[in-house]
Image (spheres, helix red, strand yellow):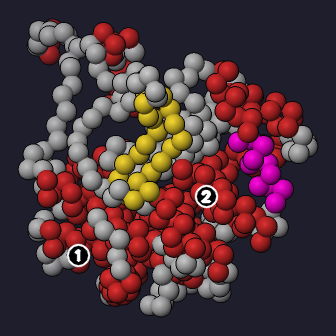
Amino acid sequence: MINYSEITPYIQKLAHLSDSNNGIVPQMYAEHDVKRGLRDLDGTGVVAGLTEVSHIKAKEKDENGNVVPCKGELYYRGVNVRDLVHGFVSEHRPGFEEAVYLLLFSKLPDKEELESFSKQLSTYRSLPPSFVRDMILKAPGRDMMNILSRSVLALYAYDENPDDISTPNVLRQCLQLIAQFPMLAVYGYQSYQHYHNGNSLFIHFPKPEYNTAQNLLYILRENGEFSPLEAELLDLALVLHAEHGGGNNSTFTTHVVTSSGTDTYSAISAALGSLKGPRHGGANVKVVQMFDDLKVNVKDTTDPEAVKEYLVKLLNKEAFDRAGLIYGMGHAVYSVSDPRSDILRQYAKKLSVEKGMEEEFCLYETVASIAPELIAAKRKMYKGVSPNVDFYSGMVYRMLGLPHELYTPIFAVARIAGWSAHRMEEIQNSGKIIRPAYINVKQAKAYVPLNER
């Protein structure tokens, strides 16, 4: 039998040939004034579109008219996320469905609108007959994001009108995917656990009276039980991950693919492929793994100096994965603070008390206080460094008992709301395909006949 995963000597040779013929060097980007990664040298994103969906504020003008970093703020359709969170938390109710409504329709729903919308999502919280058996259980995979992406593409075949990109049809498709993502993610994980790890298989069907966060915990756990605080905190995490501007990689992917006129399932699958990348959606897993390594290699984690020594080793590529990174620290846009991290931190502290993990929370706080100064001293930073949302979300997911394999899929369960809003915006406001320019730096050369090479 052929081993399709084997890297043969011939493939190694071809790979070396590819590497040796790559003549692009870093200084060429400055020479040709190329905004590598669609970012200016100071980290500012190159403007590539217009949006009403969300806004990130990380800088402001001082009294002298200079642009300076400021406390980070995030707005969903003009509503500050801090205010949105305070609203539903103070009223002791879930907020994800409200956030989805706001992102999709640019208004806060009244009580009747929210109830009707939540009921509509509940009716869509089911999968086509035999879909779980035929598309998930019969083809178990080891990577949850790939399973999720494959499942989304498979739903195309069950849609009687998949290619219609009119607003009503795209909205219907998006609402169905928003409702179905928790099942697609968790059932894929259950399949993996059963067929690859030999654990018992159980499939819980969602309960219509449960919201998104409650259903996710219910279908994930064998006994289906969860505490009110657990559901509250997962709901909060979903709200904070639901959207983050048009420039993040997966949302920009949604815009790019949507602009081609393709179907919803293809666009969302492409966004999932982007989110899977460790530079985007996989960072919170790295945070948790980094802390596990810290606890193994630092004898006294309550000693700030011992923790500092470990963090220095991280930056010097002498510890953990030797990537030279302190995961969960810093953000492409925020500098002084990430509002999502600020909010999540408060509630993570509450859950740490319920779970008896106060010592773990204190360790996170120690790293959060030491790391920014170390990073600033180690590197030439154009802006400040602070904990990002991944820093505390990884801890929250651990306290909730969520498996590492589901960290990024749960990010997707939330971000499908933002992707949907941006897809609809792109369809409604653009009739043009997104096609950036690349500068060719390879000189022309003559064709040489085969027998003369």
Residue 274 image offset from top left, x and y in percent? 38, 48
Q: Inspect the image, locate mark 1, and give the three-letter code of the amino acid beneath it.
A: Arg
Residue farthest to the left?
431
Residue 143 image offset from top left, x and y in percent? 49, 58
Residue highlighted by disc 1:
172
Tell which tag, 2 or 1, sits nearer the viewer: 2
Residue highlighted by disc 2:
344
User: Would residue 260 be found to the left or right of residue 198 on screen?
Assistant: left
Dot 2 or dot 1, earlier in sequence: 1
Q: Secondary structure at mark 1?
A: helix
Comparing 16 with 84, the one in front is 84
Looking at the image, residue 209 lies above or below residue 186: below
Q: Which residues are magenta?
A: 358-368
Residue 370 visible in the picture:
yes
Q: Inspect the image, locate mark 2, and give the three-letter code of the amino acid beneath it.
A: Leu
Instruction: Determine crowd level at label 2: few under 14, some 14-19, many 20+ residues with C-alpha closer than 10 A.
Output: many
